[in-house]
């Protein structure tokens, strides 16, 4: 079982490399804070391409490939969301972006939260999309077996995971793209990242650790869930700084199902920030 962290982590190899990233640069017109768009487990920064024309006119948009994904290699050493966030903090400081709105899907939401908790001067607010911190006792029981199956079966397990996550609502092109991405990844990289989210020391993907960790997030936050139970859980633990929305009837890749709807929500959220 992962131990609950009580302070910033030390920089390690996984936190020292600048990621490959899309960067739209400063907008021609004055707008809101920069947007840092973080993909989930098995994805890459290119999945945000449909959102860029809708957001870049008024925001600088940064969409990195997180370590182990796309063109960014996974370095040796720990690879929890907290370690990944430490690397992003160094990168954002180098770019001199100022405080960003950190938007994260699934695993990317854990990374965005870690960035806000441990590097608060870099984050104006957080937006999480179908982020899985909050798995209850049943998750703690099944995750070790799932991890073993991923290591044993490799790409076949990962592709089945994507198909279940997409559900019936995801466009075929979205499902096929994510299947291709995970099928092409090293299964051991996928396993290390999944272990880092839920089972490694310093992770906060399971509900007891997540409850403590979310209370340390002080910036305004918006959480979009597709599960009524997940939405209710976050409303109960995250405090009055967090607005929780339920997009019921969507699949796990909700940001790719409805890019225009999400872009409108992000513009509205940015405009309403104090």
Image (cartoon, grey):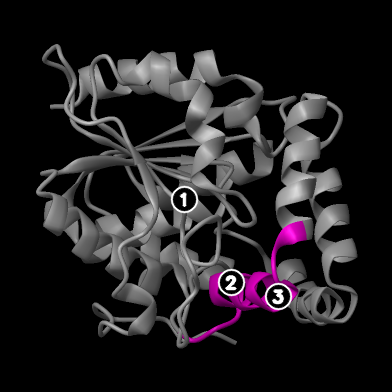
Q: Is residue 21 left or right of residue 122?
A: right
Q: Position of residue 180 (x, y in %)?
A: 77, 48
Residue beneath the point at 45% across and 63% down: 211
Q: CA distance from mark 3 to mark 2?
A: 16 Å
- In this rendering, the answer to whether 122 lies above or below 269 is below
Question: Residue 213 at x, y = what percent?
Answer: 38, 66
The quadrant of the image that shows the N terminus is: bottom right
* Magenta-drawn stretch, dominant element (helix, strand or loop): helix
Q: Residues within 10 Å of mark 3 (few under 14, many from 20)?
A: some
Residue 140's disc number: 3
Seen from the viewer's position, the closer of residues 29 and 121 is 29
106 inside magenta stretch: no
Q: Nearer the viewer, mark 1 or mark 3?
A: 1
Does residue 47 appear to the left or right of 228 in the view shown?
A: left
Task: Quote the CA–CA distance across marks 1 and 3.
Answer: 19 Å
Q: Quadrant of residue 32?
A: top left
Residue at 43% x, 81% y is: 202
Crowding at mark 2 (Cα within 10 Å: few <14, some 14-19, many 20+) = many
* Distance between the alpha carbons at the discs numbered 1 and 2: 14 Å
Can you tell which mark lies on residue 109? Answer: 1
Above or below: residue 177 compared with residue 115 = above
At label 1, counting other C-alpha atoms closer than 10 Å, the crowd grade (few under 14, some 14-19, many 20 or more) is many
How many numbered circles are shown? 3
Q: Which mark is residue 197?
A: none
Q: Which residue is mark 2?
A: 193
């Amino acid at each position: 079982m992962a131990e609950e962290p009580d302070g910033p982590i030390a920089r390690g190899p996984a936190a020292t490399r600048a990621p490959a990233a899309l960067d739209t640069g400063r907008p021609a017109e004055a707008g809101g804070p920069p947007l840092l768009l973080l993909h989930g487990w098995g994805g890459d920064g290119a999945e945000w391409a449909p959102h860029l024309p809708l957001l870049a006119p008024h925001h600088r948009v940064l969409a990195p490939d997180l370590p182990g994904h796309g063109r960014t290699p996974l370095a040796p050493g720990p690879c929890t969301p907290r370690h990944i966030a430490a690397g992003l903090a160094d990168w954002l400081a180098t770019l001199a972006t100022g405080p960003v709105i950190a938007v994260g899907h699934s695993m990317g939401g854990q990374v965005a939260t870690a960035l806000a908790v441990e590097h608060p001067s870099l984050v104006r607010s957080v937006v999480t999309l179908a982020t899985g911190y909050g798995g209850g006792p049943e998750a703690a029981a099944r995750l070790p077996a799932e991890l073993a199956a991923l290591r044993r079966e490799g790409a076949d397990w990962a592709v089945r995971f994507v198909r279940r996550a997409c559900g019936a609502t995801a466009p075929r092109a979205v499902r096929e793209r994510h299947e291709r991405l995970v099928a092409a990844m090293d299964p051991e990289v996928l396993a290390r990242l999944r272990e880092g989210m839920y089972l490694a020391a310093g992770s906060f993907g399971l509900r007891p650790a997540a409850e403590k960790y979310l209370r340390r997030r002080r910036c305004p936050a918006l959480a979009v869930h597709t599960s009524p139970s997940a939405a209710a859980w976050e409303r109960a633990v995250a405090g009055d700084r967090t607005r929780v929305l339920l997009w019921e009837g969507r699949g796990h890749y909700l940001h790719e199902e409805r890019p225009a709807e999400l872009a409108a929500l992000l513009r509205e959220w940015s405009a309403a920030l104090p």
